[in-house]
Image (spheres, rainbow, N blue to C red):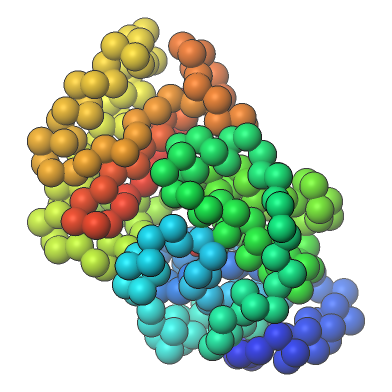
Amino acid sequence: MIVLRDKKDLLVAIDELKRSEKKITLIPTMGNLHEGHKALIRCAPMDTFKVATIYVNPLQFNDKDDYVNYPKSTESDINLCKELNIDLVYAPELDITTEIDIENRIDLPKFSGYLCGATRKGHFQGVYTIVKHLFSLIEPDYACFGKKDFQQLVLIKYIASTYFQNLKIIEVDTVRVNNIALSSRLSRLDEKTICDGQIIFKSLLKIREQLLKGDKFSEIKDSYIDEIEKLDFNVEYLEHRNNDTLETAENHLSNTSIFVACNVKNVRLIDNIQI
Ligand code: PAF
């Protein structure tokens, strides 16, 4: 496995890979790899060069403390990539945002302002900028992204369809352990809080059951928020929206999901469930 730390070496290596018939799959990450990332890597099509990136992108953090405290474990991440048969890891040591031509005015699609975009100012702008940059550098044929960050996935699909029409986005199911959607930030929580956090996904399961039985989301939503908040989780949003436009679902069930974000002890947890 090749490990590269700077753009020049990356470009040379990609050039080399491009000479082969074999296609390239990109797995972008911010490191501190867990089972969710392993699932992304396992979904890379066989017989492709697997390129993983490990880079904590400062542009997508709206909260400086969150950026500073973001867990980092690059050496063990690199070892894990090797075990999982990654061919090339790009793990820049320096701030690579200085090498990006930051677009002055990015017209993000309307849905980027909903859900996480409503409170995390600049977050999707940052994701858009780094992902578009990585797509341009690496020119992958496939790229794997998780459904836990569903809104991010919708944005990535928008970037691919607008600028990289030959790129296929592979959507990977959320990995949950004991009903908790895995996230690198979980390592900042104690066991009791993580255990209490099961209420988030359990609520999504119950809401789906009730909606399928004919209950109205608007009539049951508040009772679920109350239940979750009894455990000291602060619910940022609990919403029923369309999977493509992320507009409010207005009592339609097909092609919709329930989306939730909660804050606990300065850690933000998100999850979603398809109806
Ligand atoms: O999902 C993530 O880990 C990040 O948002 C990504 C896609 C690697 C961009 O920094």
- Apparent side of residue 188 relative to residue 127 in the rendered image (left or right): left
- Apparent side of residue 113 relative to residue 196 in the rendered image (left or right): right
Q: Is residue 143 above or below residue 106?
A: below
Question: Residue 84's spot in the image, x, y percent?
Answer: 52, 77
Query: In front: 265, or 83?
Result: 265
The residue lying at 36 percent from left, 46 percent from top is 270
Q: Quadrant of residue 24?
A: bottom right
The residue lying at 38 percent from left, 82 percent from top is 73
Instruction: Say which quadrant the C terminus sits in.
Output: top left
Query: In front: 32, or 202?
Result: 32
- Apparent side of residue 223 relative to residue 96 in the rendered image (left or right): left
Q: Is residue 96 visible?
A: yes
Question: Residue 169's spot in the image, x, y percent?
Answer: 68, 52
Question: Residue 234's spot in the image, x, y percent?
Answer: 22, 41
Question: Residue 219's spot in the image, x, y percent?
Answer: 29, 11
- Apparent side of residue 43 relative to residue 9 in the rendered image (left or right): left
Instruction: Say which quadrant the N terminus sits in.
Output: bottom right
Q: What number of labels is visible? A: 0
Query: In front: 108, or 137?
Result: 108
Q: Is residue 176 visible?
A: no
Q: Is residue 157 above or below residue 214?
A: below
